[in-house]
């Protein structure tokens, strides 16, 4: 007789609640436990996951707030800078108009070919605002009105104005012009004086217009005109006038030879300061250019 | 709140409740859950890995790490032990696949056929308890991976056919077949 073991029976016993004989043997096997370092590692990992999640949320908020604050700050700075630039431009425009008036006055008195562009522009603008009187009459009457308004008459320039080609530099004329401007009477003072004058209506009008124009120009000259002559001269030597800077910019686009020729011409015309500024800029832009001895001396 | 209260709270709550509580940020719930399952999980892994402690340690830690990472995806529909053992089983199978090829089913078949030999042809031996434990340990290590894991899920973790089927991802009949093969091998070892 052969008794065969029934695998199905073994399986049923295994699937019983007690697990059968093999499960019983298995339960008597040693019960190894995870080492404590594993416990620590697992629990630490679980804690990190929970706390890390909250931290990352906080960090996300911080990041968001930080970004927003940064954008607001940048926008504020940009706005402030823009505002400053705007005010600076306005100020520089005012200064330019003040400074541009300076060389205009002698131009109307003595026609010179070296008339500066900003001055021309300013004069043109002033003329357009005034009545449509003939330009010659207007200028003449303005000069008359001015000569009456200014008392005492303007002090003579330190150096007599040379003929047109050798016109004195603008810088040297400033002291002579600033003196009467500082003592300019107001419009209220000027108006009755003008009315006293017996002349044709057109002459009267043009005289008034000329006075107004002159006054406007002088007012535009502003505080810069009030400063004393040496101070103004020093200021002028430090900061090139817009007139010369415009020319400088224009000269920058000339060919090097032409620019040098212009510098020589300026020097010979007695506009030494302008020539030096041109030469400095020229040397900065063309450092390798060989200058003549004359120009080198001028630069030094 | 003292430890006694905490333990009572833990006893009153099911695994699933504790897991959900942990997913909501309750670290204490995780500690309770861990204490409940750390031993059985570790032994399952240790014996599945043929008592290689280093491997078992690594897989144990990895299993819990994955459970922690997947805490927000946990749904109560799945029993916690089934879910945890599923993670562990996948890691074990991955490790087997990386280490060496699976044992062939033919090999198991040969052993299974030996069981059909007449009882009088098999040596009748009374084994001491120590010897029985030793033989069971040896035969567990000798079982092919799939059979060993299935057998362990039954005798170590106490899972039924359906649960083993769910953990291992195979059909119920396959589970039964694997258990049959495993039992045949164990029986053969005990009767030699």
Image (spheres, rainbow, N blue to C red):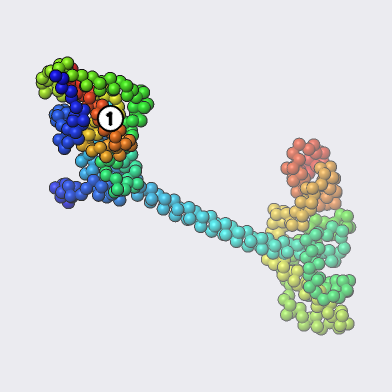
Does residue A93 sit above or below B152 in this rendering? below
Residue shown at 79%/81% (left/top)?
A193
Badge 1 density bin: few <14, some 14–19, many ≥20, Cα 10 Å = many
Total label count?
Answer: 1
Residue shown at 81%/63% (left/top)?
A120
Does residue B92 sit above or below A72 in this rendering? above
Q: Position of residue B25 (x, y in %)?
A: 29, 49
Spot the residue most to the front. A1
Q: Position of residue B57 (x, y in %)?
A: 27, 30
Does residue A230 sit above or below B121 in this rendering? below
Pick whichever, A43 or A171, lies toward us: A43
Q: Position of residue A183 (x, y in %)?
A: 72, 71
Instruction: Say left or right for A48 vs B12.
Output: right
Residue shown at 86%/75% (left/top)?
A133
Task: Describe the element under mark 1 as helix, strand or loop.
Answer: helix
Pick whichever, B83 or A32, lies toward us: B83
Quadrant of the snapshot with the C terminus of chain B: top left
Q: Position of residue A46 (x, y in %)?
A: 29, 42
Quarter-wise, where is residue A198 in the image?
bottom right
Instruction: Say left or right for A259 vs B156.
Output: right
Instruction: Say left or right for A29 vs A120.
Output: left
Please, which chain is the residue tagged with disc 1 on?
A: B
Q: Give the residue pinned by disc 1.
A: B178
Pick whichever, B163 or B181, lies toward us: B181
Does residue B120 sit above or below A245 in this rendering? above
Quarter-wise, where is residue B182 in the image?
top left
Quarter-wise, where is residue A166 in the image?
bottom right
Decide if residue B15 is in sight here: yes
Residue shown at 38%/51% (left/top)?
A58
Decide if residue A234 is in sight here: no
């Amino acid at each position: 007789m052969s008794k065969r073991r029934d695998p199905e029976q073994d399986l049923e016993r295994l699937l019983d609640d007690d697990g059968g004989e093999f499960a019983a043997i298995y339960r008597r096997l040693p019960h190894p436990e995870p080492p404590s370092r594993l416990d620590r590692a697992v629990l630490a990992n679980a804690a990190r996951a929970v706390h890390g999640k909250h931290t990352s949320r906080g960090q996300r908020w911080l990041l968001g707030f930080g970004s927003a604050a940064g954008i607001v700050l940048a926008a504020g700075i940009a706005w402030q800078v823009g505002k400053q630039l705007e005010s600076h431009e306005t100020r520089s425009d005012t200064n330019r108009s003040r400074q541009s008036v300076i060389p205009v006055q002698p131009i109307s008195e003595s026609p010179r070919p070296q008339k500066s562009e900003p001055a021309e522009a300013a004069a043109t603008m002033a003329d357009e605002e005034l009545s449509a009187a003939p330009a010659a009459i207007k200028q003449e009457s303005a000069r008359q009105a001015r000569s009456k308004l200014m008392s005492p008459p303007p002090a003579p320039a330190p150096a007599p104005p040379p003929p047109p080609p050798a016109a004195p530099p603008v810088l040297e004329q400033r002291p002579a012009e600033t003196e009467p401007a500082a003592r300019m009477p107001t419009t209220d003072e000027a108006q009755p004086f003008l009315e006293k004058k017996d002349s044709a209506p057109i002459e009267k009008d043009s005289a008034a217009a000329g006075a107004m124009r002159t006054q406007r120009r002088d007012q535009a000259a502003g505080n810069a005109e009030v400063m004393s002559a040496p101070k103004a001269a020093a200021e002028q030597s430090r900061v090139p006038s817009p007139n010369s800077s415009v020319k400088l910019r224009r000269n920058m686009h000339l060919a090097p030879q032409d620019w040098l020729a212009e510098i020589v011409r300026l020097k010979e015309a007695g506009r030494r300061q302008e020539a030096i500024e041109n030469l400095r800029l020229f040397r900065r832009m063309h450092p390798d250019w060989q200058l003549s001895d004359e120009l080198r001396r001028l630069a030094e | 709140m003292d430890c006694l209260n905490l333990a009572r709270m833990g006893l009153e709550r099911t695994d699933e409740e504790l897991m959900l509580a942990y997913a909501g940020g309750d670290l204490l719930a995780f500690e309770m859950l861990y204490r409940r399952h750390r031993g059985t999980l570790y032994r399952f892994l240790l014996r599945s890995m043929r008592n290689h402690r280093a491997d078992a340690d690594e897989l144990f830690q990895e299993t819990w790490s994955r459970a922690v990472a997947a805490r927000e995806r946990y749904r109560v529909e799945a029993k916690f032990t089934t879910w945890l053992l599923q993670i562990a089983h996948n890691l074990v199978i991955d490790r087997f696949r990386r280490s060496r090829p699976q044992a062939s089913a033919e090999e198991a078949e040969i052993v299974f056929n030996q069981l059909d030999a007449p009882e009088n042809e098999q040596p009748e031996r009374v084994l001491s308890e120590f010897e029985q434990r030793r033989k069971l340990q040896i035969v567990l290590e000798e079982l092919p991976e799939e059979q060993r894991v299935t057998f362990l899920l039954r005798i170590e973790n106490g899972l039924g056919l359906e649960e083993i089927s769910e953990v291992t991802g195979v059909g119920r009949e396959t589970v039964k077949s694997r258990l049959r093969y495993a039992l045949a091998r164990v029986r053969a070892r005990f009767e030699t």
